[in-house]
Image (cartoon, rainbow, N blue to C red):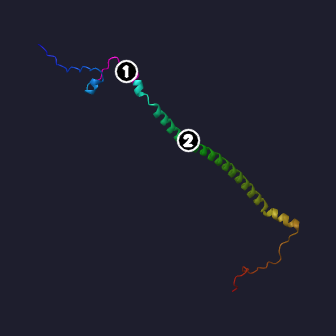
Amino acid sequence: MSSIAPTLPRPAVPSTGALGAARGRAPLLVGRDFASARTLARRPPRRLAGVLLLGALLAALPLASLRAQLTSLQYQLGEAVRTQQALDEERRGLRAELQRLRNPKRLAEIAQREGFVAPVQVIALPPVAPPGAARP
C-alpha cells in the first residue's frame, strides 16, 4: 500500500527591511533582540507614570482630610460620652439627695426641733384671678 502525504502550504519567506513590511509582508526578524523590545514595549512612558502619580496624589488628599476629620470627631465623641457619664452620675447623686431631703421622718424631726405644731383649723381660700383679668 502506498500512502500519499498531504502537502502543507509553504511558509512565506520573510522580506528584507521595511520595504517588505510596506508591501504587506512580515518584516525581517533576523538579528533582532526581542527581550529588549518587549521590555521597552511594556514600560509605560514617564509622562503617563507622572500623570498617574499626580492623579493618585490628588485622590489621596481628600481621603487624608476625611481621615483627619474622622479622627477629630472620634475624639469629640469620646469627650461627649465622658461628659454624659459624669452628668448621669451627678443626676443620680442629686436624686438620692432629694429623696433624703424629702424623707417624712427627717421633715418631722426638723419641724419638731423648730417648734412647728399641727394646725388647729384649715381655711380654704378661693382661687385668685391674675391681674388684668375680668371678674365674673
Residue 8, quarter of picture: top left
On screen, residue 38 versus residue 136, left or right, reads left
Number of numbered discs: 2
- Which one is nearer the viewer's eye here, 73 or 36? 36
Looking at the rendered structure, the secondary structure element under dot 2 is helix
Q: Position of residue 66 (x, y in %)?
A: 57, 45
How crowded pointer 1 is (Cα within 10 Å; few <14, some 14-19, many 20+) is rated as: few
At horizontal 43% and vertical 28% (from top left) the residue drawn is: 43
How crowded pointer 2 is (Cα within 10 Å; few <14, some 14-19, many 20+) is rated as: few
Looking at the rendered structure, the secondary structure element under dot 1 is helix
Residue 70, quarter of picture: top right
Image quarter in which the C terminus is found:
bottom right
Q: Amino acid at mark 1?
A: Phe
Give the residue furthest to the bottom. 136
Q: Position of residue 12 (x, y in %)?
A: 23, 21
Q: Earlier in the sequence, mark 1 or mark 2?
A: 1
Nearest to the eye among marks 1 and 2: give it: 1
Q: Amino acid at mark 2?
A: Leu
Give the residue furthest to the left. 1
Q: Which residue is mark 2?
A: 61
